[in-house]
Image (tube, rainbow, N blue to C red):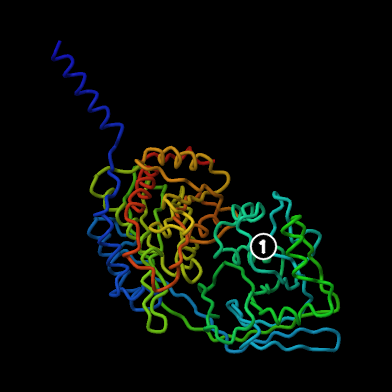
Amino acid sequence: MHLRILLLFTLFGCKSLLFSQNVASPSKSDFSGTLSFLASDWMEGRGATQKGGFMASEYIASMMGLYQLAPYNATDYFQNFKIQEHNVSKAILEIKKGKETISLSPKTDFKVTPIAESVQNETQIVFAGYGLSATNEGYDDYKNQNIKNKIVVVLKGFPSHQDTLSVTYKKFKKLFPEESNLDEIKLQTAINKGAVALIIIDNKETYKKDKDDSAFHSLENSEIKTIPIFKISKSAAEKLFLGSKISLENFEKKATQKLQSASILLKNTTVNFSIELKTESYPVRNILGMIPGKDTTKTVIIGAHYDHLGIIKDSIYNGADDNASGTSGMLALAKKWSESNVQPKYNLLFASWTAEEMGLLGSEYFVQNFDFSKQKILFAINMDMISRSAPEDKTARILSIGTEKKDENLRKMASEINVKLQSPFSLDLWETNGHSGSDYASFTSKRIPVMTFFSGFHDDYHTPNDKVSKTDSDKIKDVLFIVNNVLLNFKENQLN
């Protein structure tokens, strides 16, 4: 009898081991050293085209070698390519009202982010409110407006963006959670509607004291279509609307109180713009390592960008949260999977993207040059800023997970894993459709399902104060618990 009971316990234990296929989630010791080194002054802020970026790439490749990942290329872990930096050598922005021409000054009245080639155009302009199209919420700044081959003028923010306690603010904040990505959404909407340029009315009185940040970066022969963005001062906007019936104050009030837009073509007014560029090319690199799966024709990507802002005016922007946190987390997951000797169902590609801060260029290059005829990317995990919390997150337990609207099973899986944590996160499950705030967008553009992890914007974002001492290692550990269990539980048939 005792022998039978012992045998049952033994079989039960073996069965548990078989079902668990244990790959332990990373502990703090698996990522803390990597995080500290990547965000140290030695790495000089990891600027994609700067010395620090290349030192970081060598370090990441050495860690992939230590963890015995298979090189993505036959010889090494690097995917080398070039990006182009375009700086404005001359820019003209003129408002024409009848016979009168009002020339705006690039030193005080406007700033411009160009496209990858010099351009000149003169055409009509349409005021399109906040430049947002949220038809499901009963708000559309483009309703009944044809803006094809016209210039679109929009306000910053969204309805009630200055009143954080209002119902309207909460409604639009849920729709557009990433404030730093809002201009990108407006740009993409204008492009989709056929505009030739976007003008954003800024809150600044003048740009006289602003640093020059007009550089635009692109891939050679990029497939991405874009248009120039002009940011104009309040005084420049007054010149633009002079003689029209448009009152920005009244518009904002109606949009806030009634969700009522008032887009309009400015009659008897055109804008002439031209941009001349100086272009230079720079070498950069992604770092890619793989654990082959049982099915080598299908791949799951675990990615994080390793670049940050580098050195700016003698200050090192260490980028501990953005994104040494995601990169160290990616490497920690690679370490645990390699040590486990568990062969995954599909290839696991551990990717460290470059030039995210320059426009998602590393991940964009990867998807543009991926041979989809030989291998299928099932879905892509993205970790960008997973070690800090937003000021309003008083308990430091909010975690944002973005997926496409159709991927309900991915959201369900994340929720089920989250409750297994000793202190579960308050999950902000949002839809990536129409958003492009991080490298996940390079995959959604190819209709590849994504799951992107983000723990909140903080006051040190894109400042020299984003340092290791301010990171939350408990938060990183728990994020990696969710990611690791997603990898363990994911099956292809969970995707729509």
Label 1 residue SS: helix
Q: Position of residue 440 (x, y in %)?
A: 49, 57
- Residue at x 61%, y 62% (from the top left corner): 185
Q: Is residue 74 left or right of residue 405?
A: left
Q: Position of residue 118 (x, y in %)?
A: 62, 83
Q: Can you say which quadrant of the picture contains the C terminus?
A: top right
Q: Is residue 304 above or below residue 123?
A: above
Q: Is residue 218 left or right of residue 259?
A: left
In the orientation shown, which residue stands out farthest toward the top? Answer: 1
Q: Quadrant of residue 466?
A: bottom left
- Residue at x 42%, y 56% (from the top left corner): 383
Counting other residues with Cα less than 10 Å from the Cα at mark 1, is it few (<14), some (14-19), or many (20 or more)? some
Q: Quadrant of residue 29?
A: bottom left
Q: Is residue 389 left or right of residue 259?
A: left
Number of marks in picture: 1
**Near-viewer residue (267 or 12):** 267
In the orientation shown, which residue stands out farthest toward the left? Answer: 3
**Near-viewer residue (82 or 75):** 82
- Residue at x 33%, y 76% (from the top left corner): 44
**Near-viewer residue (443 or 437):** 437
Q: Position of residue 284 (x, y in %)?
A: 40, 73
Q: Quadrant of residue 306?
A: bottom left
Q: Inspect the image, locate mark 1, and give the three-letter code of the amino acid beneath it.
A: Thr
The residue indicated by pointer 1 is 189
Q: Position of residue 370 (x, y in %)?
A: 46, 59
